[in-house]
Each structure stands twice: as structure tokens, then as C-alpha cells.
Amino acid sequence: MPGRSSSSSGSTGFISFSGIESALSSLKNFQSCISSGMDTASSVALDLVETQTEVSSEYSMDKAMVELAMMDRELSHYVKAVQSAISHVKEERPEKIPDLKLLVEKKFLALQNKNCDADFQNNAKFVQFKQQLKELKKQYGLQADREPDGTEGVDEDMIVTQSQTNFICPITQVEMKKPVKNKVCGHTYEEEAIVRMIESKHRRKKKACCPKIGCSHTDVRMSDLIQDEALRRAFENHNKKKNRHSE
């Protein structure tokens, strides 16, 4: 078409998208900063539970995690909106180049209008934070947040018994030093042991079943494993108590 140019280098018409794509790369780097912030907030929250430090709700780590998760969602929507706008222009090749700013804003608002609280369940770090915070409170015998049915956590004696059982790796049958949790079935293993098991199975072109007796999860993958920070902290506290009693 006269007066228009196109190439595989990322330009359509007289517009070069290289600058926009470079800015998108910077935004994605900022997402990694948000991710680091969530890791820090999670670690501080677990420290506060471990030391049983009271913190007002105004400065709670839970609130910080919600705000970070919202920032992550908003940034993801903006990146998607820009990518969608670029794709639209490249594929449609309109006679008149549209106002990219307005096009991005329109697509961004469309994504934002679909926001709901359930979105946080898709944020892996937020979900992991809530689970580990709840588990650590149980390990320390603190009052857990009420469940939807109004019930609370189990009593302290049950917590201690359950904790001692959870320290045993189902593979090695000894106390774990570096536990990882399977986010699919919820079971915990010694990291080195489960990694060796998965690698051994995969070398033989087989699937690795969860080694916990009675578990129906038959395809454990490396991507299913997450660090079980709550159990690690409870384990350290358990060892400290044992050492004090032996002195």
C-alpha cells in the first residue's frame, strides 16, 4: 500500500513499536519487584507470628499483601492491554493509525471492570502466604482465623501431635530439614528426597506418585513443589524446645 511500510522488526505503517516493547520489558521487571515485595511481606508476617508480636490491622502484613496483589493484577492488566493494542494494529493494519493511548486505555478498563476478590486465588504468592500464615498459627497454638462455617482451629494438644507427625518425611521416614510442600495434594517432603524420586522416575519415563500413603496424586512434578516456610519455622522451634528440655 503506498505510503505505508511494514517489516518483521516490529513496525506497522509509520509506527515503530520497539520503544513500546522496551517499556513493556521495564514494566515486567517491575513485576519482579512486586514479587520480591510479597516475599518480604510474607517473611515478616511469619516472623511476627513466630515472636507472637501484636501488630495493628492498619500496618498488618495481610493488608500489605493485598495491596501488592492488587498492584500485580493492575500491572498485569496494563501489560496485557498494551500487548493487545499492538497486536490489533499489526494484524488489522487500519487505513488510519488509531490513537494508541485511547485504545490501550479502553482495553485496560475492560480488564479492570472484571476485577473481583476471587482474582487473589489466582495469585500463587498470595495463596501461599495465606496458607503458610494459617499453618504457622496452628503450629504455635494461636487462634486461627475463623473459617467460613464459623469454626476455629483444632486445640493445642492436637496441634502439637500433628506438628510432630508432619516433621517426618514420608520418603526418608526421618525428620525433615528442608521441607517442601506439594501444592496439588498438600503433602510435605524433604526437598532432596522428593527431587531425587521425581528425577529417578522421569529417567525411566514414569510418573512420580505422591509417597504419602493414601494420596491419590499420581503425577508429582517439580513445578508442584513450593518451599514450606511455615513448617520449617515450626520445625526450628520444635528443635529449640527439644534442646532446652535435654539441657
Image (cartoon, helix red, strand yellow):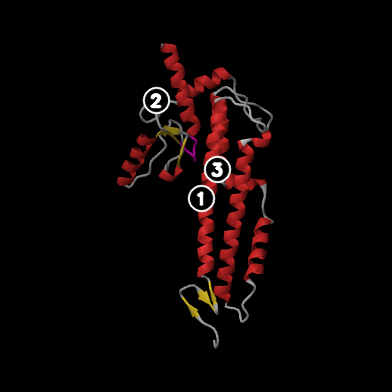
Badge 2 density bin: few <14, some 14–19, many ≥20, Cα 10 Å:
some
Label drawn at residue 38: 3
Tell me the kind of residue under disc 2: Glu
The alpha-carbon separation of the residues under discs 1 and 3 comes to 10 Å
Residue 221 seen by the camera = no
In this view, the residue in front, 91 or 171, is 91
Which mark's residue is nearer the viewer, 2 or 1? 1
Furthest residue in direction bottom, as rendered: 2
Residue beneath label 1, please?
A: 32
Could you tell me if the residues under marks 1 and 3 are in contact, i.e. CB atoms within 8 Å?
A: no
Specify the quadrant that holds the C terminus. Answer: top left
Image coordinates of residue 199 in percent, x first then y, are 33, 43
Q: Which residue is mark 2?
A: 175
Decide: is 186 above or below 84: above
Q: Which residues are magenta?
A: 181-186
Residue 182 painted magenta = yes
Q: Quadrant of residue 170?
A: top left
Rendering coords of residue 13 (x, y %): 55, 79
Question: In which quadrant is the N terminus drawn?
Answer: bottom right
Is residue 88 shown left or right of residue 241?
Answer: right
Could you tell me which residue is drawn at 55 percent across and 86 percent down? Answer: 3
Q: Which one is earlier in the sequence, the residue at label 1 or at label 3?
A: 1
Marks 3 and 2 close (CB-CB < 8 Å): no
- Ranked by sequence position, the earlier of labels 3 and 2 is 3
In three-dimensional space, the C-alpha distance between marks 3 and 2, rounded to whole angstroms, equals 29 Å
